Image: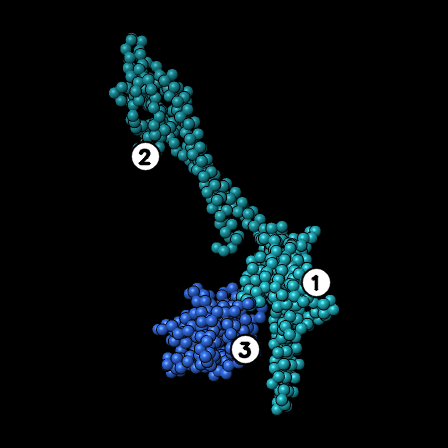
Amino acid sequence: MYSLSSRLLISVSVLLLLFFGATVAVLNTAFSEAGEQARRDILDGQVIGLLAAAEPDGNADLALPDKLREPRFGQIGSGLYGELRNAEGLVVWRSRSALGLEIPDGTVPAVGTQLFARETLADDTPLLTLSLAVDWEFDDGTSKTYVFKVAESLDSFNAQVAGFRGKLYRWFAGVAATMLLAFSLLLRGLMKPLRKIETEIGEIEAGSRVSLSDHFPTELQGVARNMNLLIDSERARSDRYRVTLDNLAHSLKTPLAAMRALLGDRKSRQFGDRFNEQIDRMDEIVRYQLRKPAAAAADKPVLQSVHIEKEVTRLIEGLKKVYHDKGPEFEVSIEPGMRFRGDTGDFLEVAGNLLDNACKWCEQKVRISAVPSVGASAIASGMVLSVSDDGPGIPPVAADALLQRGMRLDEATPGHGIGLAVVKDIARSYGGQLSIQESKLGGAEITVSIPPLTSAKSD
Amino acid sequence: MRLLVIEDDVTLRETLTQKLGDEGFAVEQAADGTEGLYFAQEYPIDLAIIDLGLPGISGLDIIRQVRADGKTYPILILTARDRWEDKVDGLSAGADDYVVKPFHFEEVSARVNALLRRSGGWASSQLDAGPVSLDMSRQELKVSDEAIELTSFEYKIIEYLMVRAGQVISKAELTDRLYDQDFERDSNVIEVFIGRLRKKMDPDNSIKPIETLRGRGYRFALERNQSG
């Protein structure tokens, strides 16, 4: 029951059944009622005909001619029967057609009125009857009550109704079947793009396809686009992990070799220091490689966003504890509700490193600001994040060196170089850049600009 | 001072315990989160060093639990994870500082001393009160600019009292915080050491640095000369 098409087919079948069932019931009733009304009108005509044909027979009684205008009264078993009874209920006349049959007495209507009724013959043949009671005034001034009664067998009528009903059922069954067939064909057509996505994903898994094609109906284009983004970012991620691992493995080899060489003359005096130096180097290499961006290459991560103000507040609360003794004053100017399109870890890494450096170098003041950058045809705004402090600043020459090589500037404050190199890597992975200026506060101002997201194209 | 070290790596835990012990701290150790949480909640400790990646209860959960219980002692986290995401999580949970693995022991020691000092309300590692000044980084006591020779136990007592200057510290607390658990507890020893300290710091009984409150304990009585 989890298949969309079977769900749809079942719901449509139930709806069709309900709809056609109701229609059949209504048509059936209408047909029977109309048929019965017609029968009644005919009976009414027949009883009036009998009344018109009745003549006094001269013995102060009524008689009907042998040959009536309606021939069916004359044919035995024709299904139309006539009868005349007197006030005592005795049969005065009975049509030839009723030969051998006993028309039931039924209810006698009041004089001057007529009464329709459904009765049955002795052999259970259903009848529709009409009785008319009249006072007949003879020429001699006397009057007698007579009951004219016509009865028609409903056999043929019922057969007609049954025939009609059968035809109705067959027609509607035919129509419903055709509709269901057409609908399932239609559904198959509609589901085709979904099946295509499934097939294409299968192909991607099998490695025979790189991304989903872009010929999908409008409703599915968003899904296909996001799928492609996900696939791309997943691929970029695994590429990056592979590269990172590769770099890590290779760069660890040098210090390992150095350590092995050192072990050779472990009796030398600075053995411990030199060994430690190599461990520090390895640690630094591992840290740098592991802190590289988590997100995929530029303009990919549209899937999540970071609440900038909230994360910056969290960072500052943490840094206030770490730099409790120094007690830097933070000045924050961030547009409320502003969001960064990308990975939370990446954002924290950028803002965390910049703020940490600022706290390290500042005299007293640290300022952080974030404004969105918007470009033409952007589907998500970018970000300009800058952090400045009132410390000694970074001389332009050193700034160039820092930006180009991501090396440590000052051994006295470890981590500065690594931090900036990581920030630079992350900014670049979002298509952005890092710049170092002199801050109005007197120290360094480091700005990370991430461009707005212009389209979700994949490469 | 009594510290708690919660770290699952045996070598690291024992090295830390031993080196912190050498620096004069009484150290409790726990190897996993469950035991760690129990110590952190039930023992009288002055500072906890908690590794974030622990078996059983995670370091973050221990910190949250301890803070939810209203404990205010400083917490230093050790983490192998260097990303800011992890540091911020730890600090937001209630930790006060972090050290990233691998670390030099001196770094841990410096952070521990700074945190302890901070929790006593001092802003720098140089505690000045009247003519008395204690340099915690050098473990040096001076009175009127004259260095005083102290045994390590005497130093521990004066440091504990000075960090908590103004507070009354009971004999039981001093014994508790200064001895390792398996040490024989004898409060007379504290009295003897206090007596010696008074004699060394204040031979002519003029500045009265340590006050005895009968039945309650001791108090470092000099006003802090707080400049920063």
Q: Earlier in the sequence, mark 2 or mark 1?
A: 2
Task: State the residue position of label 2.
Answer: A123
Which mark, by number, is residue B145? 3
* Figure quadrant of residue B45: bottom left
Which chain is assigned cyan?
A
Kind of residue at badge 3: Asp
Q: Name which quarter of the figure residue B214 lies in.
A: bottom left
As shown in the figure, which amino acid type bears the numbered disc 1? Glu
**Which chain, by letter, is blue?**
B
Residue A443 picture location, percent across and down: 67, 64
Q: Residue at x 63, y 81 (%)?
A: A278
In the drawing, does residue A138 fall left or right of residue A318?
A: left
Q: Is residue A278 above or below residue A222?
A: below
Whole-number angstrom distance, CA of label 2 to CA of label 1 = 117 Å
Tell me whether circle 3 and circle 1 mark residues in contact (CB < 8 Å).
no
> Which residue does the image show at 47% across and 71% down from the upper left?
B222
Residue A438, disc = 1
Instruction: Say what secondary structure mark 1 lies in.
Output: strand
Q: Residue furthest top?
A: A140
Q: Nearer the viewer, residue A126 or A25?
A: A25
Q: CA distance from mark 3 to mark 1?
A: 43 Å
Q: Give the camera-side residue of A33 and B26.
A: B26
